[in-house]
Amino acid sequence: MRCSGYISLVAFSAVLEINSFPGIEDCEHILDVYQKRPRYREQNKKFGQNGALDLNIGLGKILPGYRYVTSPPVIMGNVAIVGGFIYDNQSAYEPSGVVKAFDVDNGELLWAWDFLSPKGIRWDPTQADFTKNTPNFWSMGSGDEDLGLVYLPTGNTPPDFYGGHRSPEQDRYASSVVALEISSGDVKWSFQTVYHDVWDYDVPSQPVLVEWNTGTETVPALILATKRGEIFVLDRRNGQPLTDVKEQVVPQTDIPEGDMDGNVYAINRKNGAEEWQAHLNDHPDATITGSPQLYEEILYVPISSKEWATAADPSYACCTFRGGIAAFNTKDGEMIWKNFSIQETPKQTGKKNSIGADIIAPSGAPIWNSPTIDPGRGLLYVGTGESYSSPAAPTSDAVLAFSLKTGELVWHQQLLAGDAWNMSCFIGSSYNCPEEDGPDMDIGAPPILVSVGPGKDILLVGQKNGMVFGLDPAKEGEIIWKRKIGVGGYAGGVHWGMSVEGLKLFAPNADTDFIGRFDGERFPGVYALDVRTGEVIWYTRAIEDCKEDEKPACDAGVSAALTAIPGVVFAGAFDGQLRAYDSDSGKVIWSTKTNRSFDTISGRIAKGGAIEADGPVIYKGNLLINSGYHYGSRLPGNVLLNFAVPKK
C-alpha cells in the first residue's frame, strides 16, 4: 500500500502534523507542514505531542529563516522521510542538513541520517545535536518499496562557492543522488554528479523511476536531471550508470587564490604579470581584508582572521589568533617585520567549555582596516576589532600606533573595554561564546589624520557603536572629543570608512537592526562634524527605498565608506541608493537607484543590490561603484557602474 494523500507546504515552518482523512481510499493519514492556519480536518492527537512534531529538535540554535522545509515528505509505507532547505552562503556554520524518518502513526523518530556517515542512527534528545554545516536534501525524493530504498537528491555544504574548509565527509554525498534503506537510513549506494562542488550545482530534480530497456533486459532505473542540463540514467538497485558517463576534469588556472588565505601579491599593473608572492606566515585562519598601505617602498599589510567564525565549532579550542601588521619590501616581497595587536602570546586559561574544549586567551583584536601613515612621527595607525575569548585584551577595540621602521607598538588607546565576541555568540551557542558576549564593536574604519594648525594634528576615529572620536596623536591618543551619532550595531554606527574635506569630517551611520539587540532611536544617514570639536554641522537622514518583499535585506543604513571631493560627499546605502550631498549644507544634490537591472557593455543584463564596504572611486570626472552585496544577508547583485559628468 502506498499513501498518496493531500500534502501542503508553507515555507519557514518547522512542525510536522498528521491528520485523519476519512474516505481517502488506502490512506489513513496525510502529512501537513504548516505555520498557523485554520484546521479543516480532525487532527490525529496520537501523532507526536498532541498531533505535532518539532522538526528543529536536535539542530541547536537556528537563526530565523536559516532552515525550513521546501518539499513534501517522502511517504514509503508507514515511514515519512523529511529533509530541509538551508539558507545558503551566510556562514560556514549553518544548521545541519540531517534527514529524518518518522513513523506516520505515532511520530516516532525511526532513524536519522546526517550525511557524514554511511549509517543511519537512532537518535533521541539526550544525545548531542546533529553536526552543523552538512549537505542537505531540499528537493523532492522518490522511493521504491519493492527494493526498500528511498532516493534523495542532495545539495552541498555551505557556503556554495568556497570549499577550503570542507572535510572529505562533508563532500562525500554532496550534489548527488543517495539511495537510503527505508528501514534503517543506511546508505545503499550514492552517485555524485560533481566532485567538490563550489558552483552551487545542487541536484534540484526529483528522481524519476522507470523500467529501462538495455537491449538485453529490462531493469529498474532512475533518471536524474541536473542544473547543468545533464541527464543521468542509473540502475536504481546499485547506482551504476546505464548509459555512457564521462568524467571531465575541471581546468585549473594559474590565477592566485587571492588574499583570503593570507597571501600578498605584487602584480605588474601594465600586463598583469605576477612580480612576487609572499605570505603572512601567521595563523591558519589569518586573512587580509583591509587594503595594504604603500609608503617609501615598504608595503604595510593589516592582518585579520576568520577565526571569529571558526569559533562557532563547539569542539574548537578558542582562540589563538592575534591581529597584526606585517611590513614587506616591495622590491622582492621579503618580510621586514611583523608585530601583533596583542603583545601577549595566547595560552590556555585553565578553563574548558561545556564539551571539554580548551579556552585560550588573550585572542582576537583583528586589524581589518587600512593603515594610516604619519610620516612626521614615523608611525602608522590602525583600529582593532573585538577580542575572541575572555578576558578581553586591552588592545581590542583600540587605536594602535606602530613604528614604521621597527614595527614596535608605541602606544594604544582603547575606546571600548571588555568587548569579547565570536560567531558562537551570534548563533546563540554557549560553547565558545565569551562571558562578555560582545557587543562586537570593532573599529573597522581607517583612522584619518588631519592637520588643524601649525604642529597640531587630530586623529579621527569611527566605531561600530556609533561613536566618533578626535584623538591627539602627540599625546599617545588622548581623547580630545567624542560624539555619539547612532545606536550602532554589527554594521555600524561607523563601519567601513569616513571622509574629510577641510575641517569637516563626514561620517556614515548604518544603525541597522539585525537581531533586535541594540535599542534606541536610529539615525541612518550621513553626518558632518567639526574636525576640531566634534560638533554636528549637519545631519541628513537616509530615506529608505525598499519594497516590502525586499526586507529585511533592504534598509536605509549607510555602512559603506564615504567619498568626498571639493563641495560634494558621496554615500551608498543598503537599499542600493547612491547619493551626492552638498558638503556645506547636507542637501542631496542627486541620487540614483542601483538596486535594479542594467544593460551592460558586454550585452548581458546585470543586477545591482546593496552598496556596502567600498565607497565610490572618483577618477577624471568618472565615479565608479560596485552594487550588490549578499554577505550578511544584504541585497545581492554584481555590477560595476560608471557615472560621469556630461561633456559640454
Image (cartoon, rainbow, N blue to C red):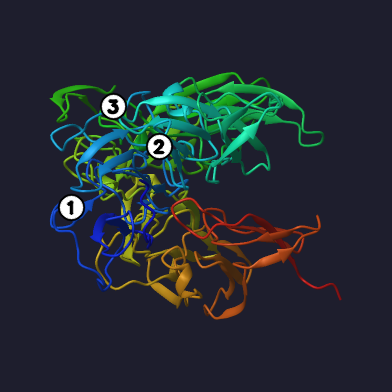
Q: Secondary structure at mark 2?
A: loop
Q: Gap in Å between the C-alphas at discs 3 and 2?
A: 42 Å
- The reply to whether residue 564 is visible in this rendering is yes
Which label lies toward us, 3 or 2? Answer: 2
Q: Residues within 10 Å of mark 2 (few under 14, many from 20)?
A: some
Residue 223 screen position, x and y as percent: 60, 38
Q: Earlier in the sequence, mark 3 or mark 1?
A: 1
Residue 141 screen position, x and y as percent: 45, 44
Q: Earlier in the sequence, mark 3 or mark 2?
A: 2
- For disc 3, the marked residue is 316
Instruction: Depth check: give the residue in front, 235 or 499.
Output: 235
Q: Residue at x 37, y 49 (%)?
A: 73
Q: Earlier in the sequence, mark 2 or mark 1?
A: 1
Which label lies toward us, 3 or 1? Answer: 1
- For disc 1, the marked residue is 47
Q: Residues within 10 Å of mark 3 (few under 14, many from 20)?
A: some
Instruction: Indicate the amino acid at tag 3.
Output: Tyr
Quadrant including the C terminus: bottom right
Instruction: Indicate the amino acid at tag 1.
Output: Phe
Instruction: Depth check: give the residue in front, 624 or 482.
Output: 624
Q: Gap in Å between the C-alphas at discs 2 and 1?
A: 23 Å
Q: Secondary structure at mark 1?
A: loop
Quadrant in the picture for residue 605: bottom right
Image position of 534 (left or right of 109): right
- For disc 2, the marked residue is 145
